[in-house]
């Protein structure tokens, strides 16, 4: 028994549910975590509709965003893009981890890395190739000085690529036969 890819590598994360440790709301502008998988890069958007996530003011280490893919999928690549808050250069992440989970609670770290100053300044996509499975993908800022700028952290985009997984045909056959056998067994005892 095992899993097999259902299709070729595809973008799995676009507009999927996102949760986070918190987000910045100035009262006149809001930067929710749902912005990290909306497909918009480069700190784009317009006032009141910016495309990136910012954590609450003066928060850094431990801040995280989690994308729920909706099912346990085969993950082949994760691409992340830092933010510099539309050219203010007062927000951004330096050190981070990326973890995967099948249940949304227990995460296994699959990436430990950092954005360079140039990647932060230029909003350069950073890509990690993987061979893993997971339903939830969590990006977390680490370390007390894990940010660029002077305010807090943020992330422009996280894109998760891979394929949905389905049980192999032999597994499905055994599963169906098992259920039929259970039904027959119960019928005989009734």
Image (cartoon, rainbow, N blue to C red):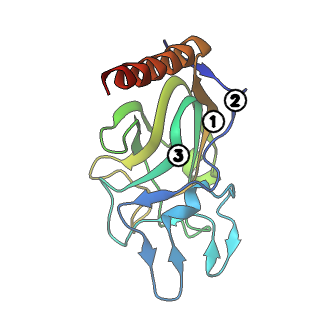
Q: Is residue 140 left or right of residue 9?
A: left
Which residue lies at the image location 46% right of the left edge and 42% below the top edge? 137
Query: To which quarter of the image does residue 57 belong?
Result: bottom left
Q: In this view, does 164 lie to the left or right of 111?
A: right
Classify mark 2: helix, strand or loop. Answer: loop
Other residues around mark 2 within 10 Å, as few (<14) / some (14–19) / many (≥20): some
Going from N to C along the chain, the mark reached first, 1 or 2, is 2
Query: Which residue position is annotated with label 3?
Result: 70
Which residue is outermost to the left? 144
Location of residue 86 in the rendering, given as x and y in whole percent from the top left corner: 62, 68
**Real-space CA distance between mark 1 and mark 3, rounded to the nearest whole angstrom:** 14 Å
Which residue lies at the image location 56% right of the left edge and 15% below the top edge? 173
Do we see residue 154 in this rendering? no
Classify mark 1: helix, strand or loop. Answer: strand
**Real-space CA distance between mark 2 and mark 3, rounded to the nearest whole angstrom:** 16 Å
Whether 182 is drawn above or below 126: the answer is above
Query: Which residue position is annotated with label 2?
Result: 9
The C terminus: image quadrant? top left
Which residue lies at the image location 52% right of the left edge and 46% below the top edge? 70
Other residues around mark 1 within 10 Å, as few (<14) / some (14–19) / many (≥20): many
Q: In this view, does 166 lie to the left or right of 39?
A: left
Which residue is outermost to the bottom? 28
Say whether marks 1 and 2 touch (CB < 8 Å). yes
**Real-space CA distance between mark 1 and mark 2, rounded to the nearest whole angstrom:** 6 Å
Classify mark 3: helix, strand or loop. Answer: strand
| Observer-nearest of 154 and 10 | 10
| Observer-nearest of 123 and 170 | 170
Query: Which residue position is annotated with label 1?
Result: 161
Do we see residue 91 in this rendering? yes
Location of residue 60 in the rendering, given as x and y in whole percent from the top left corner: 33, 59
Location of residue 146 in the rendering, given as x and y in whole percent from the top left corner: 36, 50
Going from N to C along the chain, the mark reached first, 1 or 3, is 3
């Amino acid at each position: 028994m095992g899993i097999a890819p259902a299709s070729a590598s595809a973008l799995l994360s676009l507009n999927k549910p996102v949760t986070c440790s918190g987000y910045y709301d100035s009262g006149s502008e809001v930067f929710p975590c749902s912005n990290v998988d909306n497909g918009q890069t480069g700190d784009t958007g317009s006032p009141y509709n910016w495309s990136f996530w910012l954590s609450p003011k003066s928060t850094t280490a431990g801040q995280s965003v989690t994308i729920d893919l909706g099912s346990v999928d085969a993950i082949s690549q994760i691409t992340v893009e830092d933010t510099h808050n539309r050219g203010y250069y007062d927000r951004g992440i330096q050190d981070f981890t990326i973890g995967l989970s099948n249940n949304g609670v227990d995460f296994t770290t699959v990436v430990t890395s950092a954005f360079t100053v140039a990647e932060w300044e230029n909003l350069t996509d950073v890509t990690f190739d993987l061979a893993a499975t997971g339903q939830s993908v969590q990006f977390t800022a680490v370390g007390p000085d894990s940010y660029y700028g002077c305010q807090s952290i943020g992330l422009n985009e996280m894109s998760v690529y891979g394929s949905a997984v389905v049980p192999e045909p032999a597994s499905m056959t055994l599963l169906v036969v098992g259920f039929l056998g259970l039904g027959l067994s119960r019928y005989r005892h009734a």
